Amino acid sequence: MRLEMPMPVNGANNTQRKRNREAADWILRNGNPSQSPEERARFKEWLEHDPENCRTYSAAERLMGDARRAIQSDPALTNIEVRPQSMAKPIAATMVVAALATGAFFALDGPLYLEADMIAGTDEMPVRTLEDGSVVQLNASSAIAVDFTEERRVIRLLHGQAFFQVAHAPERPFTVVAGEAKVTALGTAFDVRYGHDDTEVTVTENTVQIEFDEQRAGAVRVTQGEQAVYDYANAETVVSPVDGLVALAWKRGQIAVDNAPLSYVVEEMNRHFYGRIVVAGSALANRRVSGTIKVADTDDALAFVTMALGVKTTRLGPLIVIRR
């Protein structure tokens, strides 16, 4: 599924994003069974204030509701029983918790995606030419917000991964913001992956400069054929040589990993899976995997993981648990 909001320019971006945030906030409020009559009246007033409010709220409902309904309507999830005296207890309990986490995942990502100007669904890796002539390609389950002015070009990577081919315009710096990292192109093509534990920047042409919020780490220059990995926990950046074809394998629906934790592989698989894949336990999540994995093909990727690590998988509707 993809929800792509209109791409207003300059100051209109802020107006629409404010409306998006308000819509997401009202969805959360309206889900409260103890909502007061006064608050319901304020919601009605907000809807009627501007036709765009109604349209945006409807879009937000679709975005935040589809996945939740898929989980709630699946008998395999609603009929889970946890047997306290059974050896199956840890597995069943993990499934219940994971199912709840799945709903929370979509609920929390909904407001985030509503800030976006371009969104890729689980089966998409769209390419778009921006108004300055730059080209961006999103990985699956990724989102960006565009903020261009006459003085600067800023892209916020809200979720996932994107590859940028930047149009030459030195008078208008081109910067990609991914969490704490600000990546400024110095006439270049580069890739940014905004992950759960780190941010990766891979340069395939020329050079970029990476700066960090709150001066947690010094500025870093990364040149063609290099990859910088910024670790959130340690506030450290490691720069190393990289094969561009390997780093950009995601464009072919693959990842090439060398001694990577299973958690990383599952994070990439989840981009292409309409549901949620979880790992039962941190010890298993830290098991190491090497090889080329077709993450866009969930069944193929799961077969690779089960064979490589000797693990098992359990499916419950849109939920898959990887376990020992």
Image: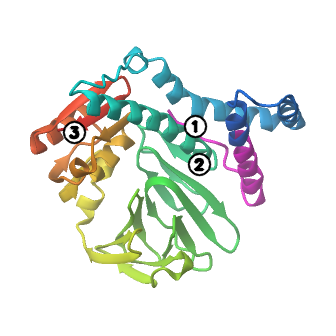
Q: Name the residue under label 2.
A: 112
**Residue at position x 77%, y 59% in the image:** 11
Q: Tell me where residue 237 appears, x and y as whole percent.
A: 36, 76
Closer-to-camera residue (143/206)? 143
Q: Name the quadrant containing residue 87.
A: top left
Q: Give the SS element for disc 3.
A: helix
Q: Name the residue under label 1.
A: 3
First in sequence, mark 2 or 3: give its number.
Answer: 2
Closer-to-camera residue (28/3)? 28
Q: Mark 3 points at which residue?
A: 301
**Residue at position x 22%, y 32% in the image:** 313
Q: Tell me where residue 215 appears, x and y as whole percent.
A: 52, 82
Q: Looking at numbered disc 3 in the image, what kind of residue is underneath it?
A: Ala
Highlighted range, magenta: 1-23
Q: Name the quadrant containing residue 38.
A: top right
Q: Looking at numbered disc 2 in the image, what kind of residue is underneath it?
A: Leu
